[in-house]
Amino acid sequence: MKAARALLALLFAIAALAACSRVSSGPTPPGGHNPWTIPGTLRLGEPDEPDGLDPLFTHTAAADNADALIYSYLLRYDKNGEYIPDLATQVPSRKNGGISKDGKTITVHMRKGVVWSDGAPLTAKDWAFTYSAVMNPANNTKTRYGWDDIASVATPNDYTIVIHLKRPEAAILGLLAMGGSSYPPLPAHLLAKLPNLNHAAFNNDPISSGPFLLKEWNHGSSLIFVANRRYFRGPPKLEKIVWKVIPDPNTLFDELAAHEIDVYPSVDENSISRLGGIKGIVVEKKLIANWRHLGINCSKPQLRDPRVRLAIAEGIDWKRINDTVYHGYNQLAVSDIYPNSWAAPAIPLYPYDPQHAMQLLAQAGWKKAPDGVLHKGALAMRLTLSTGTKEQENNEAEVDIQSQLRRLGFDIEIHNYPVSLLFAQDGPIYGGKYDLEWSIDTNGPDPDNENNWNGKFVPPNGGDTSWINDPVINRTSALAAHIYSRAKRKALYQQEEERIHQLVPTVFFYWENSYTATNSDLKHYEPAAFITDMWNAWQWQI
């Protein structure tokens, strides 16, 4: 009877988590706060640390999160992906005159009286310097996507930026916001005299324009942020944020259960069902713009033929991996456009059809040798598969992918890296030193994805890390990025995604349903669908 009751309790907890967007696992005690709460100090449990703190050179989600604490941008996204002013006084639009009628001139009015944490004024000239730094060929900028559509920048006074575009740019406001190819104003008074910023001390020890200052960085262990007393909105409500680097998800869960951390974002799938047993936490579920995929390096000789890539897509039972390894928590994906977006295309899932996959490989000239491995002339189908080292599910998924592809004649060697190395500027993915990679990418609210798929943006010029270069994808992604009509853009994205589905530079796997667990004493922490949960960190309170 006790065992049955325990099982029922567990099933009830799981059902509650799945059914509710926000649930509490116990009331706050009468004393005013949980006994483990440290008033004014928030302890974040984070699986990764940033790969740097100068956004010009960083690629990881951890860097986006840290940057949102340290920097102010011209614009930010709210929790639903809507633009909100940050350093700008308003979001530019055609209605308020911030976007010209022809869509080629953007005018941004900045707040007055904003200063850097060292007391120097932050003005329009800092953003103009950032533009020049992005476009400076001496800087190894991670991407100039969107910035290369700017014809010129003018700063008629310290609080006005006028951006002249070569042509209309539908996603131009995203360039002024957070994440991806957007960059915040950087301090010209510190950096303008340097010949390049590639190895500037600032990159790991920046001054702040945002709500928090980096106090110390204990690499591999923690980052400590303290309130920026000069923040333009006023000092944040928290005194300190302790970012604890905890790569192992089991340790993260144990720290949450022991109340050694106050926030566990995007709880590991193996741990979600156990959250109901922890008192004093709140759990929120949200479909976020993170898409997991099997990336394929189309430049590798074994993988250049789209029939081989389609064989990979059809030779793996993706639904089974989602249902078993990831416990069915996430939503299967068909494209890199957020499924709730107005631009979401109608694309079918790849069928699980290993027999047809074998036929495709034979048509492409591949035959199994006595060792069971596919060969074509001097080429053997021996490939590497890489992911980050931190999450058990991803490692299990790799082994499942390895096993299923082995039946088709693929010899897959798993070679994993820390996330900061995997996504480094000269690392395996952006350096093209991989065959297959299993990772998560993230989107901004605008569906513009030219940087991901257009051949002119292969690294080091951008984020086309599949090295696909197809005229149809190039044309549709470019056209969609440079017109404002949503109806026309939606039609172009449909064409583009149909072509991506046909050529298989990647296999889209899932959109993440994120479960975030927080101390029930924490106020105003609102997980976001896009880019970062740190979008309103100055409001957090505990």
Image (spheres, helix red, strand yellow):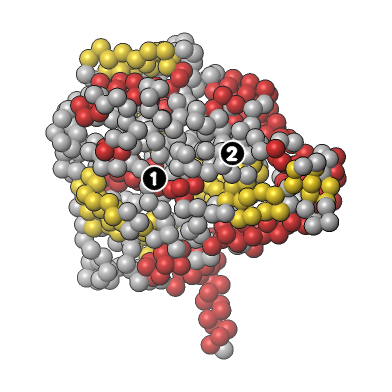
Categorize mark 1 by other alpha carbons within 10 Å: few (<14), some (14-19), many (20+).
Answer: many
Dot 1 amino acid type = Asp
Dot 2 amino acid type = Asp
Q: Is residue 13 above or below residue 537?
A: below
Q: Position of residue 528 (x, y in %)?
A: 42, 46
Q: How far apart are marks 2 and 1 (CA)?
A: 24 Å
Residue in the picture at 32% in, 67% down: 260
Instruction: Identify the mark at residue 51; answer none if there is no mark.
Output: 1
Question: Residue at the left extreme?
Answer: 119
Compare residues 520 and 502 and report the one nearer the observer. Answer: 502
Q: Where is residue 237 in the image (x, y as percent from the top left)?
A: 21, 49
Residue in the picture at 59% in, 38% down: 336
- Residue located beneath label 2 in the image: 336
Residue in the picture at 20% in, 26% down: 189
Instruction: Identify the mark at residue 496; answer none if there is no mark.
Output: none
Residue in the picture at 46% in, 12% down: 166
- State the SS at label 2: loop
Q: Where is residue 264 in the image (x, y as percent from the top left)?
A: 40, 59
Sequence order check, earlier mark of 2 and 1: 1
Residue 333 quadrant? top right
Q: Which of marks 2 and 1 is in front?
A: 1
The quarter of the picture where the N terminus appears is: bottom right
The answer, for residue 177, to whether it is visible in the render is no
Mark 2 vs 1: CB contact within 8 A: no
- State the SS at label 1: loop
Q: In this view, does 448 lie above or below 422?
A: above
Q: In this view, does 1 lie above or below 443?
A: below
The answer, for residue 406, to whether it is visible in the render is yes
Residue 246 quadrant? bottom left
Question: Residue at the front extreme?
Answer: 378
Q: Is residue 197 above or below residue 241?
A: above
Q: Where is residue 339 in the image (x, y as percent from the top left)?
A: 59, 41
